[in-house]
Amino acid sequence: MKIKKGDKVSIIAGKDRGKTGVVLKAFPKVDAVLVEGINKKKLHQRPKKSNEKGKIIEQAAPVHVSNVKKVKDK
């Protein structure tokens, strides 16, 4: 895998096509990368205590390496 943590990448396929971001974490065993601000998923969290409310959390999900392209910094 040629893309590493800290690289600036552009998304070339999927719902976030055309967006750019920095790689936060790489998962070489599954050929995926976690890109800052890209591929956000909404997770529903149950209340942990009786007086607490449930909430919806936005969390970044990994993107396959074939859907990203390295961008040169100038």
Image (spheres, rainbow, N blue to C red):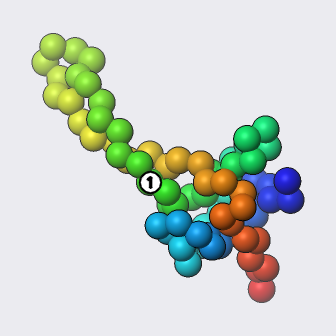
- The location of residue 11, given as percent across then percent down, is 61, 70
Looking at the rendered image, the quarter that the C terminus falls into is bottom right
Camera sees residue 8: yes
Q: Identify the element where label 1 is drawn.
A: strand
> In front: 38, or 5?
38
| On screen, residue 26 above or below 72 | above
Residue at 35% from the left image edge and 46% from the top image edge: 42
| On screen, residue 33 above or below 69 | above
> In front: 49, or 16?
16
Q: Specify the quadrant of the image occupied by residue 6.
A: bottom right
- The location of residue 44, given as percent across then percent down, is 29, 35
Camera sees residue 24: no
| On screen, residue 48 above or below 68 | above
Residue identifier under label 1: 40
- The location of residue 50, given as percent across then percent down, is 15, 13
- The location of residue 24, given as percent across then percent down, is 66, 52
- Callout 1: 10 Å neighbours few (<14), some, many (20+)? some
Instruction: Give the amino acid type for the residue marked by disc 1 in the picture.
Output: Lys
| On screen, residue 38 above or below 69 | above
Side of 33 relative to 73 (left or right): left
> In front: 57, or 42?
42
Side of 8 relative to 62 (left or right): right
Residue at 80% from the left image edge and 59% from the top image edge: 3
Question: How many dots with numbers?
Answer: 1
Q: Specify the quadrant of the image occupied by residue 8.
A: bottom right
Side of 42 relative to 39 (left or right): left
Q: Residue furthest right?
A: 2
Residue at 85% from the left image edge and 53% from the top image edge: 1
